[in-house]
Image: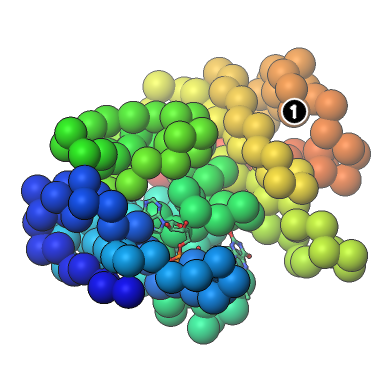
């Protein structure tokens, strides 16, 4: 297998059109290749500057999860910090997690931030939303969003029996919209409601969305996280 390391978006585009398979840290891909056979060529974005951005409103697909720090909103930082083990986070990338994994711990955070994705295909880079990104799974170059007033992330400890743990992610936008994303099992739902400082009306509005049917224990975590994020937003 030839591992190609393009140094620009146009070079990555050429690799794609020549059939190179995207690879991040290979924490998942390696086992798949060992099982199914190695492709002729793979491509890592680790030398492409656009895929390595890390700032208050942008995160590149080639960034290692262990490098995601407090330059990004707490929702994303917390999500990256709680993926797997230290060894996994030191190898796995943002792109491999959001596009290539089934657990996708970063997805609820990206959803509450209303992140837009820059993807690449053989025709060139283009903007897309998270729904299309996760459905069509193109090559992800980076994510972009607007800084929220406050955000938060909570992942419960692993449950016995292998069911993915509950994840609740929140963000308050400067136009007084609260966004809450919840992962139950492998399913992620995200809802938006108007908000002020008092959590009661926001929780009441949320209870009338799809999140209102969550099991009681999950709703308790939503209530705690909403209360905490609105307090942090008000304290700014
Ligand atoms: C022990 C262990 C524990 C884990 N725990 C968690 C957890 O708690 N939460 C969680 O969310 N995940 C967890 N995972 C899964 C983890 O998220 C993935 O292993 C990791 O994010 C994949 O990243 P990678 O860079 O290694 O991807 P790779 O293994 O390199 O690739 C995986 C897939 O993503 C595709 N891909 C890679 N980069 C891109 C890109 N830029 N654009 C489009 N497609 C791309 C590849 O083509 C491939 O299909 C765990 C994994 C392990 C091994």
Residue at mark 1: 211
152 vs 49: above or below: above
Residue at 26 percent of width and 72 percent of height: 3
Q: Quadrant of residue 236?
A: top left
Q: Is residue 182 left or right of residue 162?
A: left
Q: Is residue 181 visible?
A: yes
Q: Position of residue 22 (x, y in %)?
A: 34, 58
Q: Position of residue 173 (x, y in %)?
A: 43, 30
Q: Is residue 126 left or right of residue 38?
A: left
Q: Position of residue 57 (x, y in %)?
A: 28, 45
Residue at 28 percent of width and 57 percent of height: 20
84 vs 77: above or below: below
Q: Is residue 63 visible?
A: no
Q: Is residue 14 left or right of residue 157?
A: left
Q: Nearer the viewer, residue 12 or 80?
A: 12
Residue at 83 percent of width and 33 percent of height: 214
Q: Residues within 10 Å of mark 1 (few under 14, many from 20)?
A: many
Q: Nearer the viewer, residue 144 or 135?
A: 135
Check disc 1 and report its element: helix, strand or loop: helix
Residue at 34 percent of width and 34 percent of height: 116
Quadrant where the image shows the N terminus: bottom left
User: Cβ of disc 1 within 8 Å of ligand 1?
Assistant: no
Q: Position of residue 112 (x, y in %)?
A: 51, 36
Count of marks, rendered view: 1
201 vs 139: above or below: above
Q: Quadrant of residue 158?
A: bottom right
213 vs 16: above or below: above
Q: Nearer the viewer, residue 87 or 24?
A: 24
């Amino acid at each position: 297998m030839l591992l190609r390391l393009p140094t620009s978006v146009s070079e990555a585009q050429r690799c794609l059109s020549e059939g190179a398979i995207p690879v991040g840290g290979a924490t998942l891909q390696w086992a798949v290749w060992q099982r199914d056979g190695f492709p002729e060529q793979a491509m890592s974005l680790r030398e492409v500057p656009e895929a390595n951005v890390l700032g208050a409103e942008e995160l590149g697909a080639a960034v290692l999860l262990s490098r995601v720090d407090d330059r990004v909103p707490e929702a994303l930082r917390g999500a990256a910090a709680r993926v797997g083990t230290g060894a996994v986070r030191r190898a796995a990338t943002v792109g491999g997690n959001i596009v290539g994994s089934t657990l996708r711990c970063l997805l609820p955070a990206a959803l509450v931030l209303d992140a837009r994705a820059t993807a690449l295909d053989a025709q060139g880079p283009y903007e897309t939303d998270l729904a299309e990104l996760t459905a069509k799974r193109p090559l992800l170059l980076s994510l972009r969003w607007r800084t929220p007033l406050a955000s938060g992330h909570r992942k419960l400890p692993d449950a016995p029996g292998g069911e993915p743990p509950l994840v609740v992610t929140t963000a308050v936008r400067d136009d007084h919209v609260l966004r809450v994303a919840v992962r139950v099992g492998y399913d992620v739902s995200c809802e938006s409601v108007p908000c002020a400082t008092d959590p009661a009306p926001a929780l009441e509005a949320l209870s009338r969305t799809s999140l209102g049917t969550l099991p009681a224990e999950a709703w308790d975590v939503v209530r705690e996280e909403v209360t905490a994020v609105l307090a942090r937003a008000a304290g700014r």
